[in-house]
Image (spheres, rainbow, N blue to C red):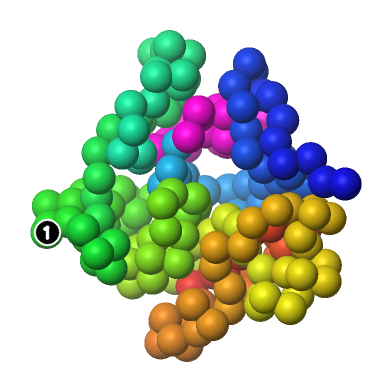
Amino acid sequence: MYNGSFVYKNLMMSQNKNTPIFLNKLLAEKRPTRVLEIGTFHGALTLLLRDLLDINNLEDSVVRTYDTAIQKYLIPKVTDEIKIEIFNKNIFNYNYNDFKDEESKEEIASFISSGSPTLVLCDGGCKRCEFNTISPLLKKGDIIMAHDYAPNKQYFDDHIHKKIWGWMEIQDRDVKDISERLNLQPYKQEEAQKAAWLCKIRC
């Protein structure tokens, strides 16, 4: 039976046990200077990302996280020494098929363009919407990920559900068009899939 969450620094993290292992390998190899997280929840994954960057001598890399709910559990743990930028705001429109406005789009575009490479994690209210909306802002070499992933429903039922993870909110067909248009290719997908994440690189 899978474990759907664990505690990190006294905060609940809704990830399976393979996520820290995969993220550490990814950060060590790609060495991003910017990490953008959509969906903070309690903030445990945000803290883990910060710690893994520091462990890999990426102390100058910036972590930025967005959530529509106030990050009341994370905020007390962030100090001047911990480079995490916390944003309590909605950057998507009502239909969740585009940015809320040009200002929001430019805010995200500026953050992504200022780092090389940039890592984006989509784990908010609509993973497929976030993936499709943010992907066009990526530069070549940037990585974009989405949580609660399975290639398709059959694969989820046979290999993921109640084995490594309990939810599927994004599958290959959801990102097929944007992946073909932008030349988004799988990146370490076999390892990412063990953590229920989709992972692609813009080529």
Front-most of residues 72 and 18: 72
Quadrant of residue 101 in the image?
A: bottom left
Residue 100 can be seen in this image: yes
Is residue 109 placed above or below 19 in the rendered structure?
below
Q: Which residue is mark 1?
A: 102
Q: Amino acid at mark 1?
A: Glu
Please state the horizontal and vertical placement of residue 191, each as a whole percent of the image: 77, 60
Quadrant of residue 163 in the image?
A: bottom right
Image-based side of 23 in relation to 161, left or right: left
The image shows a total of numbered marks equal to 1
Secondary structure under tag 1 reads helix
Measuring 34% from the left and 54% from the top, which residue is drawn there? 112
Measuring 73% from the left and 69% from the top, which residue is drawn there? 156
Is residue 10 placed above or below 143 in the rendered structure?
above
Magenta residues?
A: 41-65
Measuring 33% from the left and 27% from the top, which residue is drawn there? 70
Neighbourhood count class around disc 1 (C-alpha, 10 Å): few under 14, some 14–19, many 20 upward: few
Image-based side of 122 in relation to 156, left or right: left
Residue 120 can be seen in this image: no
Quadrant of residue 19 in the image?
A: top right
Please state the horizontal and vertical placement of residue 41, each as a whole percent of the image: 48, 34
User: Is residue 47 within the magenta segment?
Assistant: yes
Please state the horizontal and vertical placement of residue 86, each as a whole percent of the image: 34, 30
Front-most of residues 74 and 152: 152
Measuring 28% from the left and 33% from the top, which residue is drawn there? 88
Please state the horizontal and vertical placement of residue 180, each as a whole percent of the image: 47, 88
